Amino acid sequence: MAKEVMDRKASDNEYLHKDFHISMNVGLEFVRENYGRDGVVEYLKTFSSHYYAPLTQGLKEQGLSVLRDYFQKIYEIEKADCKIEYSEDLMTVAIHECPALKHFKKMKVTPSSLYILTTLTVYETICEGTPFAFECLEYNCATGKSVLKFFRRDLL
Amino acid sequence: MISCTEFIPAYSELFKYLEEKGSKKKVMEFWEYISDEYLNDSLKKSVEEAGIRGCWNYWSHSLNEEAAAFTMTLDEDEGEFTITMHDCPSKRMLLNMSHMEPYHDYCGHCDVLYRRVLEPLGYEYIFDDSQTDNAKCNIKIRKIR
């Protein structure tokens, strides 16, 4: 049998490995089993404060437009719908179906009971120390259908 | 949602978190856990069904979706499969981040996860991690005769 060879450059493919959603889910389950809900919150807060630091900084310096651009980009990459209503003081993001939960369904993976924290804790942390706050108005744990609200704190 | 395109930094931060909470042993425990939870249904099943070609099938899918720069070879007569990773997209992403430090042994998971699946199936797993600081590595998997 002949030897088979596959050669690829990075530019040959689009970077979209949906199974990473499954790995994220496995990671959350490991932390939950070892350290409980508090551990999952602690891990996600730590990750978010480090990784999304440029977004947090952007919120302080440029406002909600930074977050609007972020959502548009991420949902476009994930090939999912996300409807954004934006003003300088208030933004709502309506997500028809979470791409991660859609992939779990396709792959017959049970979502972590704490998967919702990848929304709640992550966006709360991104907004911490900025003039903006986050509120989750709606979240369906089976589909990830959700409505997220970001607004200027002094409008509270 | 954390996008699948943001998973690698989340993974790296998880290793750091676990090491801070419970030492390197906890990180190793997690790598074994993810190997059992995730690879048993993918890589293991693929190799059980197709032998050494199962490695080719598994990595053809994942490395293309990860947009890696690589050369893969399959020699079924010799029972050998190799990956020469010219530029690992995960490690490259971490190296390019100016505002975050990657976990010090990030590439260590590639040694533990796959070895744990393949060795019990009768394969030798050789991981050359000497160039991971440049996002390069080599993996050789050989059927033990």
Image (cartoon, rainbow, N blue to C red):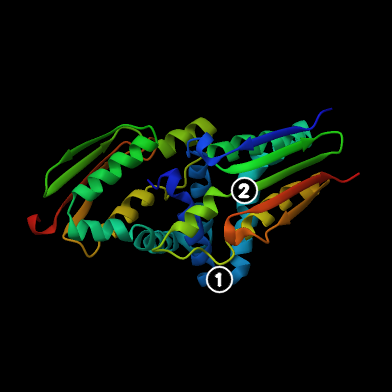
Q: Is residue B121 left or right of residue B40?
A: right
Tell me the residue at 60%/51% (across/down): B34
Name the residue furthest top.
Answer: A1
Instruction: Say if A48 sits above or below A111 in the image.
Output: below
* Eye-nearest disc, 2 or 1: 2
Residue in front for this viewpoint, A116 or A7 = A7
Q: Nearer the viewer, residue A132 or B99?
A: B99
Q: Which residue is mark 2?
A: B86
Residue A92 appears anywhere in the view? yes
Give, as a three-letter code, the residue at label 1.
Answer: Gly
Q: Tell me the subunit letter for badge 2.
A: B
Q: x and y percent of residue A14 in the render? A: 48, 36
Answer few, some or many: residues within 10 Å of disc 2's Cα (few below 14, many 20 plus, some between 14 and 19): some
The mark that comes first in sequence, 2 or 1, is 1
Task: Please give the count of numbered marks on the rendered protein.
Answer: 2
Q: Which chain does the numbered disc 1 sit on?
A: B
Residue type indicated by callout 2: His
Residue at the spot 74% in from the left edge and 44% down from the top edge: B82
Q: Position of residue B108 (x, y in %)?
A: 63, 60
Front position in the image: A16 or A136: A16
Farthest left residue in view: A155
Is B76 located above or below residue B89 in the figure?
above
Which residue lies under the disc numbered 1?
B22
Image coordinates of residue A56 in percent, x first then y, are: 27, 59
Does dot 2 land on a helix, a strand or a loop?
Answer: strand
